[in-house]
Each structure stands twice: as C-alpha cells, then as structure tokens.
Image (spheres, grey):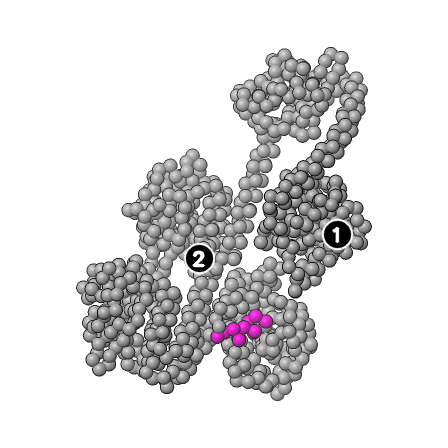
Amino acid sequence: MKIKRVLIVDDKEENLFLLQSLLQGHGYEVVTSAHGAEALVKARKNLPDLIISDLLMPVMDGYTLLRNWKADERLKTIPFVVYTATYTDERDEGLALDLGVDDFILKPTEPEPFIARINQAIAKAKLTERPPVRTPIAEKASLMKEYNEVLIRKLEEKALQLEESNRDLQKEIVERKRAEEALLQSEGHLLSVVQTAGDAIVTMDAHGKVRFWNGAAESMFGHLSAEMVGQPLIGVLPERFRGGFQHRPKQSIETGQLILGQHPVETIGLRRNGGEFPAEITISSWKEKKGTFSTAIIRDITERKHAEEEIKKRLRELEGMNRISTILRTATILEKMLPSLLEETLAIVESDTGAIWLFDPTTGTLRRAAARGWLAAMENTVCKPGEGFPGGVFTTNQVHVSDEFAHDPRLHALPGHSIPAGWGGACIPIQSEKGIIGIECVALQLPRKISPEQVNLLVTLSEMAGTAIQRTGLIEQTTNQLERLSALHAIDTAINASMDIKVTLGYFLDQVMNQLRVDAAAVLLCDPHLLILEYLAGRGFRGNSIAATRMRVGEGHAGRAALDRQLIHVADLMHDPVAQPERVAGEGFVSHTAVPLIAKGQVIGVLELFHRSPFTPKEDWLEFLKTLAGQAAIAINNATLFSDLESANVNLSRANDATLEGWSRAMDLRDKETEGHSQRVTETTLILAQRMGLGDEQLVHIRRGALLHDLGKLGVPDSILNKPGSLTEEEMANMRRHPTLAYELLLPIEFLRPALDIPYCHHERWDGSGYPRGLKGEQIPLSARIFAVGDVFDALTSDRPYRKAWSPDAAVDYIRENSGKEFDPRVVEAFLRE
C-alpha cells in the first residue's frame, strides 16, 4: 500500500515537530514548510495527498495559500485542512469555508480525533465516486473585504503579542547587559582573547569613531590600529555602502537596543590597497560610565561566498539537467522537444543564443531544427556536411570550442550565415547508437568564455539528447504508422458506408491532405474507351482552373503517370517544360506529384498532389502515397463494381494484419534475445483460446492483441530492454510503463480497440499483484489471462540477457505451481490438457 504524503505548513518549529511526530506515528510520510509560498513550490514539485496549514504566517498566510491552492488545476482536488488556534473566531472559519477549505480544525485537539478527521479527508479524496471538490465562491468585493478584515484583525492581535514578547526581550537584554558588565571586569583576560580572535573586532564610541582595533582587523583591512583609532569605521566600507551604516550606532544609543546582534548583515569591506571583499558584520551596543559604545564583529566571507556561488551554480545545473531529463523522457514529438531542450540548455550556461541542427539522411543535409538569438536570424536553414557554420563540425564529429566564431579559420560561413564579431562558444556533436545525428551550438558574448566544465556538461546533455531524439524518432515513426493505419481504416470505412463516389473521394482527399501534408490534391478519372483524364474531385485549390482539366493519356505529368503506370514527382514545377501552367494558374505551386490509380490491372485515374513550397518526398511518404492511391482506385472501382468491394476489404484487412505482423517482427528484432517471441506466443495463445471455446471473431482480436502485446516497449530505452543484469527500481518502473504506452498508442485506432486487452493487461496477475492497474481475478480480461500463460511459457523457455532458457518441463511446473496466484486456474487447466 502506498504511504500517504501529508504537507504541513506552520511558521513555528515546535508546531511542525509535534504534528510531524503525530502523523509519522500513524504511518504518514510528512513534508514540512515554514510558509505558504514554500508549500506551493514543494506541492507542485511532488503532489501530496493532503495539506494541513496554519493561518497566520510570514511571506504567505494560510488564506492566500488556500486561494492559490484552489486556483491550481493540479492541486485543487487535494484536500486542504486548516489547523489553527491563533486568535480564532467564527469569522475565521467562515472565510476559510468561503475560500474552499475541506476541513477546519481548532487547536488543541486530542490526537485520536485529529487523526480520524485527517483519515476521513483523505478517504473522501480516494472514493471512486468522489463528491464534488469544494469550490471557492467567486471572489467578490465582499469576500475580499472579509479576507482583509480578518487578516488585519489577526495582524493586530499578533502585534499585541509581539509587544508583550518585546517587553520580555527588553528585560532579557537588560539582564544580558548586566552579565556583559560583569564579564568586562576581567578586562585584561578579555583583551587577550579579543586580540587573538580570528574575526576583526572593533569598538566605536557614540560618534562612530574607532576606539579599539584588534590584530585580525589589521590583517583583514591592512590598516594598523594606530592608523584607525579615532577614525570612523565606515572608512573601511566602499562609499556606496556607507550611508546604510552611518546612522545605525546612533539609533542603538537612542533605543538602547542591540542592532544586528543576532542577525549579521552582509556587506563589502574595503582594504587599504583599494581591494574589496565580501564581509559579514554584527554590531551591538553597550554602556559604561565613560559613555555608550558599539562593538562590531567583522568576518571575511570570501571563501564562503565562493562556495555558495559554486553550490548555486551546481544547483542551477542540476535543476536544468533535471528539467532537460524530464523533457527528453516525456516528449513524443521532435518539433516540440528540441526548442525546449535548447531553451533549458541555454539557461544552464546563462546564454540566449544557440541552435540545434539535425542530419536528414534522405537529403544528406543538416537542417536547423531549433534556434535562438542571432543563430535564428541566419537565412540558410539547410547546409551540407562540411559546409557552413555547423557543417564543418559535423564532418569532424569532434567537440569544437572557439574563442570567437567570426575569426575561427575552421568555420566558414555560407551566404546568409552572417556570424557577428565578439561571440564564441562551443559546437557539440549529437550522437546516437547509429552515429552522429546532429550538432548543438551554444554561443557566449565576449568577454565571457565557455569553461571546460560547461563543455563537459554540454557533452553530457548532447549524449542524453541523442538517445532521446532516436527514441522520439521511433515513437514518431510508430505514431505515424498508427495514424496512417487508422486513416486507411477510416477510408476503408467511408468506402463501405457510401456509394456516392464524390462523397467518398471528398473524405479520401481530406485524409490525403492531412496524412501527407500537401497543399492541394485532385483525382482525375480515366475514360478507358477515349483514354481521356477528367477532373473528378479536389481539395485545397484557390481557383477553379483545375476543374476544367481534360487531357489525353500521355499528355502532361498526370497523363504520363497514367500511360507509364508509374509515380512521377516534379521538384520544380515552374521551370518544367512538360508542366501545363494553365491548369494551376494563380495557385503558386512549386512541386507536383502524380500517381496512377490502378484497379484490377486497369488504370482508372490519377491522383495529383501539389506543394506551394519546395518538397522532397521520403521513401515512407512515397510508399504511403502508393497505398492511398490503391485505396482511391478501390473507391472509384467500388462505385461501378460493388460486388468486388468485399474482396477489396478482405485484402485490406490482410494488409493491416500483415502490417501488424511486420510491427511484431520489428519489435522482436529490436531485442535479439526474444526474436520470434511474438509469433510463437501468438500461436500458443490462439490454441489455448480455441481449447477454451472462444469464437472466430474473438480469435481475430486475440491474434492482433498478441502480435502487438509488446508495442509499448518502443518507449523503453535499449539500455534497459537489453540490460544483462537485474533492473534498478527506476529502470523497472520505466519497463512497467510499456503496457500503458501500448494502450495509449493503440487506443486511437478504432479497429484495434477490441484487441487492446492483451497489450494493456497481459502483466496483470490473478492474485492482484500485477501491473499497471493491479487487476485481480476475473477483473482481468479473459484474453489477457489466456495470453499470460503462453507468454510466460515462451519467455521461460527462451534465452534472455539475464538468464538461460528453462526446459519445457521446468516451465510447465512453474505454471502449475503458480495456478491461482499468477494465473487463472481454468486457463492453466486448459494449458495442461493434451
């Protein structure tokens, strides 16, 4: 059972300690905060199960915290409990209820009733049918007036309490002064101690002039005691800091109170040679018969400041790396991931200029994928390896550090790659398992120079980015495949649903434009007798010229595609002699693709695609275009030959299943140790399902689900998937996400939804100890229970990176022993039958 986390907010340490002890004693994990602002930061970073807050606190009071809590989409459903006794009356509770508090508890409360109310608040939040979340009423003027009145009243009451405390403090100060006077009686001993102290100790008279200057002060400031006695202390402070200290001793004399006695103030010291250094100064005042004096204890905190800056720097780096790690781990689209990656990288090195280029193997060029500062202003976004600003670094595959890019002989700018003077930095290769895939560049304006530590950090980040880019590319590829498969299925459904060819083609062209990212598309119908191509349907055209299309087969690019039965792509339509500009006058098209529509060996039309910007098709784009062209041909043929539709649908279904088998084999090939696993376990599962009496329709979905059961492992890094040893907790948590990833990938595909049970639930266990949802018994879908037995049997009898294969008899014994624990007893019984 997960331990519940409670966030306690109170500015008094004793209250925090008592509440923390009580809650931890009842099994809760406790996080503490001294005020509301700190509590919001901690809650947003790691969501608690409940918050307990006082009302009157510094920085941010409990009412303001409650308002911010209920306004936060992630926090507002988490129960908020007020626990207070600070000047409480009925108006306090009423205001809290108006602001949306879930419970209001007055101090003191007996432990058991208090814990009971906390348990009740958390239990309500866990209910499946949870009552509506308490919503604060609208912040009208009356509510804000009530809020201000309550807060002012509390502050007034707090001020009275502080006055009383101050009087007590005054008494304590008087007593302390008496003790100090007694201590000064042993002046000789004290002087010896002060002279040998490590901190500078200085005594001043009522006018702020130095009366005593110890040895440490001489060493620290470079002034001898004889030089400083009679001089004002502010003379050893830079002039810009003197005004803040000049009147403080006088204030101490008038009030009779210690100044900064318990709270040292940081300032800047001035050495005799004019050098400055960070210092910490504490000033207190005391009286004797000769008059009123002040004592200043000064400490050189240079080393501490350096350490603090280094710690802050490291903290910024670690926080930045954590944010980058989150971006790289969660991103599924490169277009969104890369700008965020660049932004966080630049923040770590405190720069506003940088860029990322990725290598496109299809075109053999580097494409700028994200940029900031003057690197974003470069006109040329594409260059070849060895050319231009990033190309030279790409060919060497080495980290390149430059004091100034503009004067670096190894970097040659192309036209449009203007490099301003006064900028240096580093260019880091981005590596993946397949080699270099891009370049990341970070620029700093002189006199700043990139440090070796920053270069090492950038190398680490680029290695992380390379793995993430490769993973995201695979996810995008899989997602595109799934979207395209879904589009094919949707088109298939539209073909079946309508006999109106224009309605069907209209839907088809919408899918074409969406999936292939084209600017316009048209379908030309072929008259088999006259060998004439005529316009039938189109999308994305600004004018109507295309609708007048009537050409002979062999005429123009579309006619040649029909005649040669081959796809034709024209990259520069404006200067192509075969183009027919009158057909697309005023459209601004740059590239043109034509693919014949062939059904049953006959050319029945041509699908034309147009782009208004330069476009070079990739192999998968062309393959999908051909698939879409096949569907368009089916749609047209369906209008006249409805009897052939059933056969076309069967072929499409087989193509889909073949695609699923291809994915299954591709997933198995990713893990050499489990090659062929999906095919084997699918066959075993189908045999078991038949033994248990499942029908043919169910077997179809079981087969698809079994083939795709490990689809989610595309989101699992190879370092975890192929790790030879045991997985860490973090790695195991990553691995256990693959059923959920499979569910999220397959859910949008309507025809695969009946097959989701196996990919989503095949790691659930009969006794409820499985994942991802901890289903138990017959809560687990039957198909997943059947698959689990076959999956475990095949896994146990196969070699894995972390162990050798078991014998079939040993695997059968394991399944028999875990019947009723891991496996459904009925499925095990069917499995054991001959």
The main secondary structure of the magenta stretch is helix
Packing grade of label 1 (10 A; few <14, some 14-19, many >=20) is some
Packing grade of label 2 (10 A; few <14, some 14-19, many >=20) is some
In front of the other: 162 or 141: 141
Q: Tally the marks.
A: 2
Spatial CA distance of label 2 from label 1 is 45 Å
- Position of residue 36 relative to residue 532, above or below, is above
Q: Is residue 804 magenta?
A: no
The answer to whether any part of residue 192 appears in the image is: no
Residue at horizontal 57%, vertical 26%? 268
Residue topped by disc 2: 334
Amino acid type for the residue under numbered disc 1: Leu
- Position of residue 198 relative to residue 376, above or below, is above
Q: Quadrant of residue 580?
A: bottom left
The answer to whether any part of residue 304 appears in the image is: yes
In front of the other: 825 or 480: 480
Q: Residue furthest front?
A: 142
User: Under tag 1, what secondary structure?
Assistant: helix
Residue at horizontal 32%, vertical 52%? 383
Q: Could you tell me residue 370's position as x and y percent?
A: 41, 51
Residue topped by disc 1: 23
The quadrant of the picture occupied by the N terminus is bottom right
Q: Which residues are magenta?
A: 751-761
Amino acid type for the residue under numbered disc 2: Leu
In front of the other: 527 or 731: 527
The quadrant of the picture occupied by the C terminus is bottom right
